[in-house]
Image (spheres, rainbow, N blue to C red):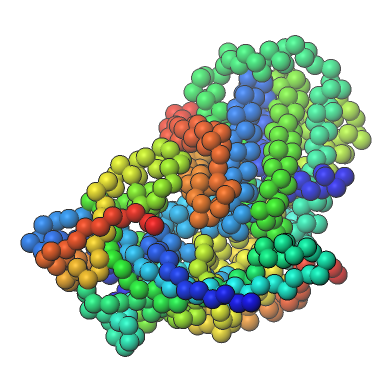
């Protein structure tokens, strides 16, 4: 148990990155339209985020510098400022969606309208940010979010044609009903969702919150290798249940109740209840992660005092940022705009902004001034270089594909 | 037994000093190095080009706007940290004074006194077992 | 004088020839190191007591302006690859070194004038190795 709790930071980061409300919908949509022919992208993304988070965690542990501090120090004010504007906007959009998602999950189990749950959800998120110890927060949200494994259980209970599923994974092809451009658009969207910068901002700042030092590098590795593959597994399970139940029936995913439909079909009320708790915990965890990321990026860019480990009075501007972000999220949600559709687009924009976050980390991970003798080895650098190319290609292709396919419609 | 020694280190401003974090004597982040003030050795005036010069102070404080678009606010609008207050130089600059005693910390103190400090629980230490 | 008066300034030779831009400014910093031996514990053998590192306290002293780093181009030099031995990540390091080949260090004594975003060097200015020691 202690081992699993020790990986809580990685698990919570992954939950916020792979199965937050936006990803829940995207995975279900992808499963219902493309089956499992895009799973290779999830695999590519999991390896990428493991590499990225491992490097940024190592930088944070050895040098004490969280990722956005590294971005500010190595890119200079102008490029870092551009990165800040993009990252902060994406964070805020995602946070808005998560608070909306919490309200939706609460609506699933009660007859109370989501709109009324929104302020309650935001207040609950803020109370946790204000008072709870970082470790308690990550343990509870991370572990409860793992209840989403119920989707994998449902998949087994549904007794699908495993041969067919494996064939879809290993011989991916564009289904008849979709065009290649839309296929590649969703490929980039899934890749961007796996490697969203706020995962790295949160993970590296969390490493500083937990006080990791050079001797904790093994723990850094455990967190990365346990958390992100688990996250990838969960998102594939969601896509698979959608592929098995929704795809053949031609059901289009447009609401949360359709996403959990396969679970209800497979396992009845107990499993459904577990999964709904999992959805609530995952979206709550993602709300914590994105709001903290907003605080981390702004405070680290300007050099303010930050961190949940400090008394709020000693990190005043950081906490003010958290409060303002939540207030903006609630205000946007009250206008009844659909936040989930907005996050699907913001995932594409974060794929475009990813190189600006990745390059400074790759550079600093090789800098002896920061890392001492813990600089990147040859294998890390080789892998890091390969992913640099992949990231740049995805960044360049994202916007044209989005325009060409009308955002995948 | 005490061994004392004096050594020198070569640093380049943009590479090692600019945009770096400034921490107070308790390790609390204070500001970011935005610029450096150069003075003549007797610290009385601006150095003439070609004659000896040294760092007089660390300057912090252009707003987001000047950081993004360039340009420089006048010297009176920028907070100074005396170079003598710098104790250590690594990947951060560590000062020998407390954050609260510095001019540059006024915004943080303002937000603390007017807003965060007023919310119940603002002084609560989250790491203390309660 | 403020550092940003000099950074990114255009550099002209004594005859007005364009030499490049100031990409960085070099300082020499005095560091006083005091090492106090930590009180040894009694159960450790004598050889070990000698090897224990003491408490080190560092104090930063004066930072003297040494010179200006001039490169034919602006941009990208903040990464410093042309001045250090760090060679990875390979593609980025290689590109920065190539872009800033021809960077040199000018001692501050050889600077004649700093005015309006332009630095003029004195006659007989020296070009030195920009590498960091």
In the image, B22: left or right of A289?
A: left
In the image, B35: left or right of C13?
A: right
List x then y, in percent, for residue C52.
68, 64
Q: Nearer the viewer, residue A210 or A318?
A: A210
Q: Nearer the viewer, residue B126 or B1?
A: B1
Q: Is residue A105 above or below residue C114?
A: above
Q: Nearer the viewer, residue B54 or A161?
A: B54
What is the quadrant of the C terminus of chain A in the image?
Answer: top right
What residue is rendered at 47% in x and 74% in y?
B6
In the image, B56: left or right of A263?
A: left
In the image, C72: left or right of A39?
A: left
Q: Is residue A134 above or below residue A346?
A: below
What residue is rendered at 55% in x and 46% in y?
A375
Residue furthest to the left: C15
What is the quadrant of the N terminus of chain A in the image?
Answer: top right
| Location of residue B123 (image quadrant) | bottom right
Q: Is residue A174 above or below residue C31?
A: above
What residue is rendered at 65% in x and 65% in y?
C53
């Amino acid at each position: 148990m202690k081992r699993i709790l020790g990986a809580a930071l990685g698990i919570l980061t992954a939950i916020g990155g792979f199965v937050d409300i936006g990803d829940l919908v995207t995975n279900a949509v992808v499963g219902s339209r493309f089956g499992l022919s895009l799973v290779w992208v999830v695999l590519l993304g999991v390896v990428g985020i493991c590499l990225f988070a491992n490097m940024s965690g190592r930088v944070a542990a050895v040098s004490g510098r969280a990722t956005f501090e590294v971005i500010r120090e190595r890119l200079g004010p102008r490029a870092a400022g551009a990165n800040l504007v993009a990252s902060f906007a994406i964070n805020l959009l995602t946070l808005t969606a998560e608070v909306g998602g919490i309200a939706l999950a609460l609506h699933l189990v009660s007859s109370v309208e989501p709109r009324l749950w929104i302020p309650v959800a935001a207040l609950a998120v803020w109370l946790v940010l204000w008072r709870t110890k970082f470790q308690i927060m990550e343990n509870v949200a991370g572990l409860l979010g793992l209840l989403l494994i119920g989707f994998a259980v449902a998949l087994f209970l549904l007794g699908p044609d495993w041969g067919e599923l494996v064939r879809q994974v290993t011989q991916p092809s564009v289904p008849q009903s979709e065009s290649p451009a839309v296929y590649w658009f969703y490929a980039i969207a899934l890749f961007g969702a796996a490697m969203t910068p706020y995962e790295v901002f949160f993970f590296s700042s969390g490493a500083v919150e937990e006080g990791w030092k050079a001797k904790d590098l093994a723990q850094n590795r455990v967190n990365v290798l346990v958390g992100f593959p688990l996250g990838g597994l969960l998102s594939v399970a969601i896509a698979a249940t959608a592929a098995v139940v929704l795809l053949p029936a031609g059901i289009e995913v447009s609401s949360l109740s359709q996403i959990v439909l396969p679970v209800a079909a497979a396992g009845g009320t107990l499993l459904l209840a577990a999964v709904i708790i999992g959805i609530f915990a995952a979206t709550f965890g993602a709300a914590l992660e994105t709001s903290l990321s907003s605080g981390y990026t702004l405070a680290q860019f300007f050099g303010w005092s930050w961190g949940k480990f400090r008394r709020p009075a000693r990190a005043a501007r950081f906490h003010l940022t958290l409060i303002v972000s939540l207030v903006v999220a609630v205000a946007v949600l009250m206008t009844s705009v659909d936040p989930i559709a907005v996050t699907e687009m913001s995932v594409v924009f974060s794929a475009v902004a990813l190189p600006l976050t990745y390059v400074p980390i790759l550079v600093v991970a090789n800098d002896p001034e920061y890392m001492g003798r813990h600089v990147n080895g040859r294998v890390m650098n080789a892998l890091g270089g390969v992913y640099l190319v992949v990231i740049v290609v995805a960044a360049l292709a994202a916007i044209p594909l989005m325009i060409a396919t009308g955002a995948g419609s | 037994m005490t061994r004392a020694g004096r050594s020198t280190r070569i640093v380049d401003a943009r590479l090692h000093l600019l945009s770096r974090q400034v921490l107070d004597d308790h390790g609390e982040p204070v500001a970011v190095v935005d610029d450096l003030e150069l003075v003549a050795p007797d610290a009385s005036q601006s150095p003439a080009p070609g004659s000896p010069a040294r760092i007089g102070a660390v300057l912090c404080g252009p707003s987001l706007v000047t950081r993004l678009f360039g340009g420089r606010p006048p010297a009176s609008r920028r907070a100074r940290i005396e170079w003598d207050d710098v104790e250590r130089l690594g990947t951060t600059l560590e000062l020998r004074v407390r954050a609260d005693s510095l001019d540059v910390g006024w915004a943080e103190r303002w937000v603390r006194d007017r807003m965060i400090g007023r919310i119940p629980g603002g002084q609560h230490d989250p790491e203390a077992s309660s | 004088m403020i550092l940003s008066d000099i950074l990114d300034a255009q550099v002209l030779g004594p005859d007005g020839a364009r030499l490049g831009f100031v990409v960085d400014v070099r300082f020499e910093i005095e560091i006083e190191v005091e090492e106090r031996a930590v009180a040894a514990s009694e159960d450790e053998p004598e050889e070990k007591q000698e090897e224990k590192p003491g408490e080190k306290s560092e104090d930063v002293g004066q930072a003297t302006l040494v010179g200006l780093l001039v490169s034919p181009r602006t941009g990208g030099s903040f990464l410093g690859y042309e001045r250090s031995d760090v060679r990875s990540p390979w593609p980025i390091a290689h590109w920065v070194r190539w872009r800033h080949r021809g960077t040199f260090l000018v001692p501050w004594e050889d600077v004649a004038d700093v005015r309006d975003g332009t630095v003029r060097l004195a006659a007989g200015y020296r070009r030195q190795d920009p590498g960091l020691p």
